[in-house]
C-alpha cells in the first residue's frame, strides 16, 4: 500500500528530533521542510526541503514555493506560531490536504511563563481559531489541554507527543554515584551561579563526607568565564569540573551514570526527560522557565521541585548524606521515562494524530 505523504514545516531541523522523524517515516512518506538551519547530524531516513524565506520584522514569509509544495502532500504539519506568516493563514484556505499543528500548545517563551491558568489574551484568541480550524493538534505535554478547557476547542482532536530526547542504554552502578550534574548552555538566566553557591554551602556544612562529591557542569556560553572565576574565589577548583559542551551521547551517559541528581535551578526544558531517561532525578525551581517539561516530574517521586533559592543548599546536602533516597528516585524517574516519554512515545503521538486526521472528512 502506498504511504500517505506528509510534510512537516518548521524553522530548524534539530538533531535531537531525527530519531522521531525516522520512526514517523516508517509509517508515512515523511518530509521535513525548514527555512533557518539543518542541524541534523544523525542519519535522516526522511526527505528534507530547504525553504527560502524573507524576514519582515519578527515575521518569516515563506512565499509562493511554500503554497505550491504543500499541494504535493496528503497532510501538512506546522506550528501555530504567527511569527511564521503562512502558518497563521494555512488553516483557513481551501485545501485538499489535511492540516495539523505541532507545538507547545499555548503561547509561552522565556519572558512569558508556561501558565495554563492565565487569562486568554488577544493573540490566544487567534491561536484558538488556528487550532480549531486544524484537522488535528499535537501538543508537547498533556498539561497544555487545561489552557483550552474554557473554550470550545475540540479536545478529541488533541494528541500528545511528549517533548523528549533519546538516551543511550547504560547501567549505572549505584556505588559510583557521587556527583551533582548540570547540563545546558551557560546563560545568566540558567542560575548556575546559584547552583555553585548552594554546592559550596552544602559541602562546607558537612564535616566528613563518606565519598568525595563533585559538581559536574556540562555546557558552554557567555557565563563560562564568570562561573570559573567564582569557583576559583570559593576555592572549589578540585570539586567543580567544567566539561565544556558535550554532544556525544556516550560521553553524556557516562556523566549521568555518576550523578545522583541533575540540578537545573531556573530552567526545566529537555534536560528533564533526558535526565530521567538516564535514571537521574531532576532538581529545579517551581517557577523555572519551561515548555511544559517540568510536568514530567512527580514531586518527591521522580524529582524535586523547590520554591526558594535558599532551599537549594539543603537539598544538595541531603543528596550527599541520603544518597539511597535519590538513587530510588532515579529508578522511579527511569520507569516513568520508559513508560511515558521515550522517542517512540513522541513518534506515536504524531502517528496517531495523522491517522485520526486521515480518518475524518
Image: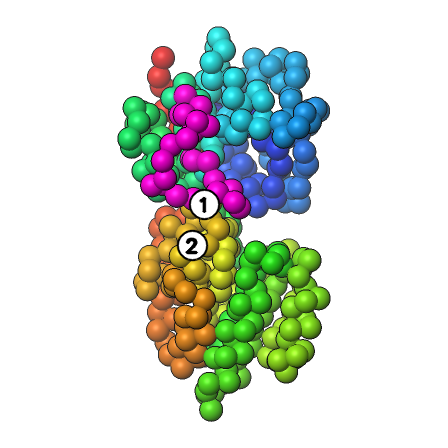
Q: Is residue 214 left or right of residue 328?
A: right
- The verdict on residue 124 being magenta is yes
Dot 2 crowding, Cα within 10 Å, few <14, some 14–19, many 20+: some
Residue farthest along the bottom direction in this orientation: 208
Q: Give the extent of the magenta segment.
A: 105-129
- The verdict on residue 195 being magenta is no
Query: Which disc is residue 233 wearing?
Result: none
Q: Main secondary structure of the magenta part?
A: loop
User: Where does residue 249 sit, x and y in percent of width and height?
Assistant: 59, 57
Asked if marks 1 and 2 touch (Cβ < 8 Å), the reply is yes
Q: Quadrant of the C terminus?
A: top left
User: Where does residue 40 sit, x and y in percent of width and height?
Assistant: 65, 41
User: Where does residue 278 sit, x and y in percent of width and height?
Assistant: 47, 61
Q: Who's the residue at 49% across and 64% down the image? A: 263
How many numbered dots are placed on residues in this image?
Answer: 2
In the rendered image, is residue 347 in sight?
Answer: no
The foreground one among 178 and 295 is: 295
Query: Which disc is residue 287 wearing?
Result: 2
The foreground one among 39 and 42 is: 39
- In primary-sequence order, the first of circles 1 and 2 is 1
Q: CA distance from mark 1 to mark 2?
A: 8 Å
> SS class of the residue under badge 2?
loop
Does residue 199 sit above or below 12 in this rendering? below
The foreground one among 7 and 229 is: 229
Q: Which residue is mark 1?
A: 113
Amino acid at each position: 500500500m502506498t504511504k500517505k505523504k506528509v510534510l512537516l514545516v518548521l524553522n530548524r531541523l534539530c538533531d535531537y528530533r531525527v530519531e522521531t522523524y525516522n520512526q514517523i517515516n516508517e509509517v508515512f512518506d515523511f518530509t521535513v521542510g525548514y527555512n533557518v538551519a539543518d542541524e541534523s547530524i544523525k542519519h535522516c531516513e526522511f526527505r528534507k526541503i530547504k525553504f527560502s524565506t524573507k524576514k519582515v520584522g519578527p515575521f518569516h514569509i515563506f512565499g509562493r514555493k511554500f503554497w505550491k509544495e504543500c499541494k504535493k502532500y496528503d497532510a501538512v504539519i506546522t506550528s501555530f506560531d504567527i511569527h511564521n506568516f503562512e502558518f497563521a493563514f494555512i488553516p483557513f484556505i481551501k485545501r485538499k490536504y489535511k492540516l495539523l499543528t505541532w507545538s507547545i500548545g499555548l503561547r509561552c517563551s522565556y519572558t512569558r511563563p508556561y501558565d495554563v491558568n492565565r487569562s486568554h489574551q488577544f493573540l490566544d484568541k487567534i491561536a484558538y481559531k488556528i487550532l480549531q480550524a486544524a484537522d488535528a493538534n499535537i501538543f508537547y505535554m498533556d498539561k497544555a489541554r487545561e489552557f483550552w478547557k474554557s473554550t470550545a476547542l475540540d479536545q478529541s482532536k488533541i494528541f500528545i507527543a511528549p517533548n523528549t530526547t533519546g538516551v543511550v542504554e547504560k547501567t549505572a552502578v549505584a556505588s559510583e554515584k557521587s556527583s551533582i550534574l548540570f547540563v545546558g548552555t551557560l546563560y545568566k538566566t540558567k542560575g548556575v551561579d546559584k547552583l555553585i553557591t548552594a554546592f559550596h554551602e552544602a559541602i562546607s556544612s558537612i564535616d566528613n563526607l563518606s565519598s568525595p562529591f563533585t559538581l559536574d557542569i556540562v555546557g558552554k556560553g557567555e557565563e563560562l568565564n564568570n562561573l570559573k572565576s567564582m569557583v576559583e574565589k570559593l576555592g572549589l577548583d578540585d570539586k567543580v569540573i567544567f566539561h565544556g559542551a558535550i554532544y556525544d551521547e556516550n560521553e553524556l551517559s557516562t556523566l549521568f551514570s555518576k550523578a545522583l541528581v541533575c540540578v537545573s535551578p531556573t530552567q526545566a526544558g529537555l534536560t528533564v526527560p533526558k535526565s530521567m531517561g538516564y535514571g537521574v532525578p531532576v532538581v529545579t525551581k517551581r517557577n523555572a522557565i519551561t515548555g511544559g517539561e517540568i510536568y514530567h516530574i512527580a514531586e518527591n517521586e521522580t524529582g524535586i521541585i523547590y520554591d526558594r533559592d535558599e532551599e537549594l543548599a539543603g537539598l544538595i546536602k541531603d543528596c550527599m548524606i541520603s544518597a539511597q533516597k535519590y538513587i530510588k528516585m532515579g529508578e522511579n524517574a527511569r520507569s516513568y521515562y520508559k513508560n511515558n516519554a521515550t522517542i517512540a512515545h513522541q513518534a506515536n503521538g504524531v502517528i496517531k494524530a495523522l491517522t485520526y486526521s486521515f480518518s475524518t472528512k
